[in-house]
Image (tube, grey):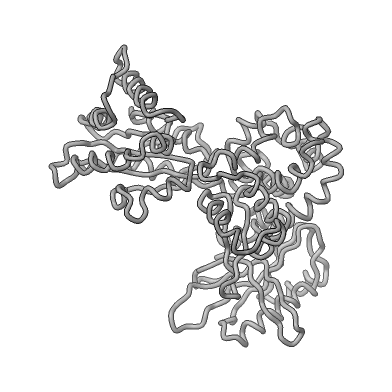
Amino acid sequence: MVAKPGHIFDRDWEWEALTSFATGTQAEVAFGVVSGRRRQGKTFLLKNLAEALGGFYFEATEGTEIELLRLFGMALARHTGSPVGYPFADWRDALTFFFSLAEDGPKPLIIDEFPYLMKANPALPSLLKQEIDLRGRTHGGTSNARVLICGSALSVMGKILSGQAPLRGRARLELVIESLPYRDASAFWGVPDDPRLATMLHAVVGGTPAYRDEFVQGDRPESVEDFDRWVVRTVLDRRTSIFREGRYLLAEEPDIRDPALYHSVLSAVAAGNNTWGGIAGHIGYRSSDIAHPLNVLEDCGLLVREKDAFRSGRTRYRIAEPLITFYQAIMRPEWSDLGLGLAEEVWRRSRQRFLSKVMGPHFETLCREYALRHGREHFGEGGIGEVAAGTVADPVARTQIDVDVAVLGPAYPGEPRAVRSLGETKWDKLMGVRHLERLRRARDLLSAKGYETFGTVLACYSGAGFDDDLRAEAARDPAVLLVDLPALYGRA
């Protein structure tokens, strides 16, 4: 295994996957696809891979087919030491030379931002498929090329290997570069010992690595007390590059033709309207008219659809990138004043909105991530099949109980679904026994509906703590779990 460079933070299994693919000993061409939302570090990883293994790396840009072919030839010339660029007649000619770079042994050959090339020449995936097949096992395995294509346009990358696409069935590697998990993000930003600050910071910038150095030049809040000043001097400051990022992330998606409509949809979700009907009502559309923008935002990786754990057919939507939520909830309504440089004034009147519209929902998301990644030590050894929010109908009270963190076991045909845990979250409220009683009521209702609730853990997640009565109840009942901020970050 090729050692990961010391300047790459985390990403251990991604590096292992890339290097294993690139150094594979099979005597034929291998093809892989790397994708992920923008700013997650895909290019950084691939450039380091090429450098570590002496491979070739080319990053495409927007341009005409002739221009991109010329740039490709110039990049190949630099790699081979030629003083002039290669004047390829067409892409078939270029790909033939491209594959020949690995004749002496396995070598990564990387084309980044591949969707730009596809836009200039839609036939390129077919040409690439033909070249791969020509050098495959059935033709004697005449190339050791380890070809990797990469792209941030998820709506485009998702179609490359789907359905009847030319390259379907050719990939030996499909790697998605995700945002850093919240615990790793806290270490990356240098705030692992302050879980409250780490949570508030994550609600703004999430686990996107590029925002730390490229967008705020390493500026980080020194403490919870410094957080407000940090927001004012970075995200809300019109002079910083992160200031317009929430707008640019949408504008960069090739499938979005009417940005105003998509901004309205995201604004609706950021305001708490997370159901299909709620989104439609917020923007003044009929429910049937928002299917397309919702699907496009999902395909772009900007919106996540999550099904209700207990109500079949009901789904909720969540914005995938915290910075977009922050922009839609805090910045977009105040864009004129922010453009005038009134960041401090805007933040002073928006901070309460930040706590209710951003921090509360984001804390719920982190608690579900905690349950998924770290809950097995609390929820038994039966496995976790799903973690989601859920709604439990209470016919006696003629109301419903919202469960913020429902942990279900795997779904086995003919067997009742096990409920590993039911949880409620509160970011800024002290939790008490009444919150626990709601969970007990939900557990009993689910048991009556046929769910397996023996051993269900009732979890209270709080950013503000627990009162003495709830702590006493947890001490008496092993089925009660209290998760505060230190526990959420593994500091308990």
**For this view, does 209 lie left or right of residue 58?**
right
Task: Assign the C terminus to one quadrant of the image.
Answer: bottom right
Please name the residue shown 56% across and 46% down the image: 180
In terms of image quadrants, where is residue 218?
top right
**For this view, does 317 lie left or right of residue 284?**
left
Q: Relative to residue 438, is residue 251 depicted above or below?
A: above
Counting every numbered tag in the picture gives 0
Q: Relative to residue 51, is residue 358 depicted above or below?
A: below
Tell which of 43 and 350 is nearer to you.
Answer: 350
In terms of image quadrants, where is residue 56?
top left
**For this view, does 24 lie left or right of residue 296?**
left
Asked if residue 146 shows in the view, the reply is yes
Please name the residue shown 81% across and 30% down the image: 340
Q: Relative to residue 420, is residue 374 depicted above or below?
A: above
Residue 284: x %, y % from top left: 71, 58
Task: Assign the N terminus to one quadrant of the image.
Answer: top left
Tell which of 389 and 460 is nearer to you.
Answer: 389
Residue 471: x %, y % from top left: 77, 69
Residue 235: x %, y % from top left: 72, 36
Q: Relative to residue 48, is residue 197 depicted above or below?
A: below
Asked if residue 486 shows in the view, the reply is no
Please name the residue shown 49% across and 32% down the image: 6
Residue 470: x %, y % from top left: 78, 71
Q: Which residue is at the far top?
A: 83
In terms of image quadrants, where is residue 201?
top right
